[in-house]
């Protein structure tokens, strides 16, 4: 298991700092940009993998509390390294609504990953790296 070094943590955004824009694929033919939601609260839910028991429970919980997020006009984006086809099947199987968007963050650095996650390597959960 690799550990995040102090130098990898130096670029974490402070609370209240606008996140840098990024664009990730949400379906085979559509992309989602963080800037699409500029001016609205956005919840970035990073999770290691579709289909794992813990992640399935995590996304089901987010789906259950979506009405609470909607009270604040907040958008929920689930990010993992799984591909769009996996996300589509996972969302259908778990009955995740369109208000719970899953996006694919390919392995390797993506624009905004370092600032959002504080990691300069693969954008995966620290418990899985």
Image: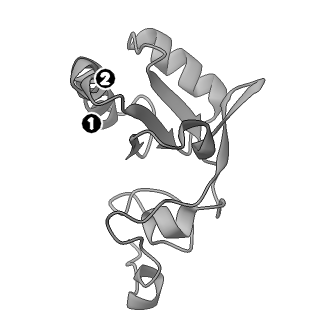
Scheme of colours in the image: one colour
Q: Residue at x 47, y 57 (%)?
A: 124
Q: Disc 1 on helix, strand or loop? A: helix
Q: Residue at x 42, y 66 (%)?
A: 17
Q: Residue furthest bottom?
A: 7
Looking at the rendering, in which quadrant would you find the C terminus? bottom left
> Dot 2 surroundings within 10 Å: few (below 14), some, or many (20 or more)?
few
Q: Disc 2 on helix, strand or loop? A: helix
Query: Residue at label 1?
Result: 54
Q: Residue 75's mark?
A: none
> Dot 1 surroundings within 10 Å: few (below 14), some, or many (20 or more)?
few
Q: Residue furthest front?
A: 39
Near-viewer residue (48 or 79): 79
Q: Is residue 69 left or right of residue 99?
A: left
Q: Residue at x 50, y 69 (%)?
A: 115
Asked if the residue under mark 2 is in contact with the one under mark 1, i.e. CB atoms within 8 Å, the reply is no
Please tell me in which quadrant of the rendered image residue 40 appears: top left
| Percent position of residue 104, x then y | 60, 39
Q: Is residue 16 above or below residue 87?
A: below
Query: Residue at label 2?
Result: 70
Mark 1 or mark 2: name the one nearer the start of the chain.
Answer: 1
Near-viewer residue (114 or 53): 114
Q: CA distance from mark 1 to mark 2?
A: 24 Å
Near-viewer residue (23 or 70): 70
Q: Nearer the viewer, mark 1 or mark 2?
A: 2
| Percent position of residue 71, x then y | 25, 24
| Percent position of residue 32, x then y | 64, 35
Q: Is residue 59 above or below residue 111?
A: above
């Amino acid at each position: 298991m690799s550990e995040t070094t102090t130098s990898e943590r130096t670029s974490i955004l402070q609370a209240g700092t606008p996140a840098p824009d990024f664009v990730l694929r949400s379906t085979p033919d559509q992309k989602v940009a963080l800037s699409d939601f500029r001016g609205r609260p956005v919840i970035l839910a990073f999770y290691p993998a579709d289909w794992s028991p813990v992640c399935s429970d995590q996304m089901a919980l987010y789906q259950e509390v979506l009405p609470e997020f909607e009270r604040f006009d907040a958008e929920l984006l689930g990010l993992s390294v799984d591909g769009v086809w996996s996300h589509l099947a996972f969302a259908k199987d778990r009955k995740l609504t369109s208000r719970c968007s899953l996006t694919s963050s390919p392995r390797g650095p993506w624009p905004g990953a370092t600032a959002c996650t504080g990691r300069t390597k693969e954008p995966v959960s620290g418990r899985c790296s």
